[in-house]
Amino acid sequence: MTRRYSALSLFKEGLAGQTGWKQAWRSPEPKPSYDAIVIGGGGHGLATAYYLAKNHGITRVAVLEKGWIGGGNTGRNTTVVRSNYYYPESVELYGLAHRLYEGLSKDLNYNVMLSQRGMVNLCHSTAEMEIGARTVNAMQINGIDAELFSPEDVRRVAPIYNFSPDARFPVFGGIWQGRAGTARHDAVAWGYARAASRLGVDIIQNCEITDFIIEGGRCRGVQTTRGTIRAERIGMAVAGHSSVLAAKAGFRLPINSYALQACVSEPVKPILDTVVLSPGCGVYVSQSDKGEIVIGGGLDRVPSYAQRGNLPTLETVIAGLLEMFPIFGQLKLMRQWAGIVDVVPDSSPIIGESPLPNLFLNCGWGTGGFKAIPAGGTLLANLLATGKHNDISRPFDLDRFASGRLIDEAAGSGIAH
Amino acid sequence: MQLFPCPFCGPRDETEFHYGGDAGNARPDGAEVPIERWAGYLYLRGNPKGTAREIWVHTSCGEFFVMERDTVTHKVLSSTAFGGEHAA
């Protein structure tokens, strides 16, 4: 049986007719009880299970997923990895995720195809350049790589941008993060699933939570479509459906669920080798390894649990894209989709114990959950293992909404996420 | 493009409307409101999957109203003039 992926095992399997490959992860029947349950088989849930086993030695863990793993927002994002945030708390959090991403393929023995092709946030006026300089300064002071780009720098990394004199959104410069880039989103889910399964974690798909078991005011397990499963520590990482589970557990969250759309064009030859974001156009775009132009934009304006998206937002995004890159007017769109994201008033995540003791939260990532997967998993695993915050997760507790210590990144870094 | 019914102007494009929050989210009154109650009023949301009662504003005529809507199918169930739903 070939368990470890390497050039040598690929060669050996080639000689053996590819017959020795082992299933990437097991699909066991749920046991009646575990040390910890993780609800949600997306990137954050699978990463939580992996780090519980790896960092804390807790391997009697179940990941419960109502559909198939990686089928929610993990498979619906635009695959961008970055850490260009403003506040020190956010830098600690997203910086941790970014560093873990850089070593993830080796750690998981699974190629997540991290491509650090850099990302530029464009500035379209002198006022935006002043804010850009402030952001770059803040990032550098906080120890994150950042560079203030001139128009010539932008032209160097994105020559196909609309630099014509009559452009609606002229380029005055930009915020550059060279370590930013993209990763293969499905591989992140599959890699964590495989690595967690090898450490003993049970990944249970098609298993929907119908209710929580609450005894003595504490969460003691869950009722599911595949039976009752008990545990003393339960974590949930279910993004846009957090409010639905919270209602079953008897509390409310500061979350509104919205559809976030994305789309890809037909594949074309390499033309854009970086990630370009224009806050003015409300669009960010990159080119996938297959050649598709991957296009993302802002939220739909109608609260929604429908994973499809509305036409007006798609029109706005495409209009913005064509302002940035008129050359893309010839492209045909191949696919369009939406994921349901959990939007919090201060655009920062919620990590910590819920109002129901023993039930822990990892939610509120809004439009930026993918880049944070390794950190979200590490921090929720730490909470489930120890019951306590560490210095990185503490500022993101639910209690910040009563204390007023919000971490307003929508205002701080000017990144709508 | 979806049409939303304004109780005053009739069916209009969804882009003319702006979401204004949960209907029935009463503002706490009095001098001795506990901090959790304020946080609840300001931040906590029902965010239901399925039927939702929401405050909307039709930005063209400026009127606020209550719309009942299914958040999965996006079907509009009712649309009525605002009758002080924020009162306790």
Image (cartoon, coloured by chain):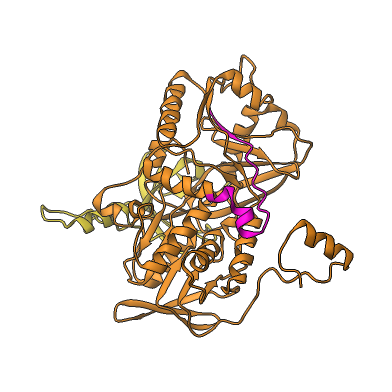
Chain colours: A orange, B yellow
Magenta-colored stretch includes residue A331:
no
Q: Quadrant of residue A317?
A: top right
Q: Nearer the viewer, residue A268 or A2?
A: A2
Q: Nearer the viewer, residue A18 or A71?
A: A18
Q: Nearer the viewer, residue A225 or A140?
A: A140
Residue A402 in percent (x, y) is at: 25, 54
Q: What is the magenta range?
A: A100-122
Quadrant assignment for the C terminus of chain B: bottom left
Magenta-colored stretch includes residue A121:
yes
Residue A138 in percent (x, y) is at: 40, 32
Q: Identify which residue is drawn at 64% across, 22% down.
A: A155
Residue A318 in percent (x, y) is at: 63, 37
Is residue B65 visible in this depiction of the protein?
A: yes
Q: Quadrant of residue A163?
A: top right
- Above or below, A250 against A124 in this view is below
- Residue A241 is left or right of residue B87, and the answer is right
Residue A229 in percent (x, y) is at: 48, 81
